[in-house]
Amino acid sequence: YSCGGKPLLASDQLQEPGCCSLCGGSRHYEMQLMPPLLYFLKEGSEASGAVCPTEYWNWMTVIVYTCSK
């Protein structure tokens, strides 16, 4: 988590997040989710008895941007 910071990237192919679809304000980086999170999501879903096929999840990073307003 690094509100207003910069994500850690494995590639230099990052697209601009664009503007907020509700107000038109700029978006800023808030946090990113990394692959180790998959382990914890799987453990949590198994412990709760939820049906969540995490074996099909495959991503390098999820970057979250929020509206600056």
Image: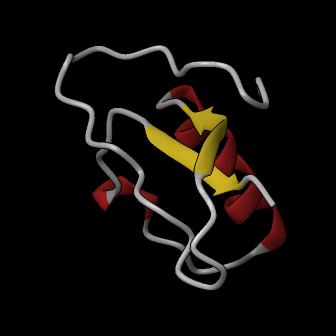
* Residue 35, x across and y down, in percent: 47, 31
Identity of the residue drawn at 58% across and 37% down: 33
| Quarter the C terminus occupies | bottom right
Closest to the observer, 13 or 46: 13
Left or right, 58 with respect to 47, comes to: left
Residue at the limit of the structure toward the bottom, as seen here: 22
- Where residue 60 appears, as percent x and y from the top left, is 33, 33
When asked about the image quadrant of residue 2, the answer is: top right
- Give me the residue at 68% from left, 20% from top: 5
In this view, the residue in front, 33 or 37, is 33
Nearer to us in this view, 62 or 68: 68
Question: Percent from the top left, x then y, of residue 27?
Answer: 59, 52
Is residue 14 toward the left or the right of residue 54 in the image?
A: left
Q: Residue at x 82, y 70 (%)?
A: 48
Q: Is 57 drawn above or below residue 63 in the view shown?
A: below
Query: In this picture, is 6 found above or below 28?
Result: above
Q: Residue at x 21, y 17 (%)?
A: 11
In what quadrant of the picture does the N terminus appear? Answer: top right
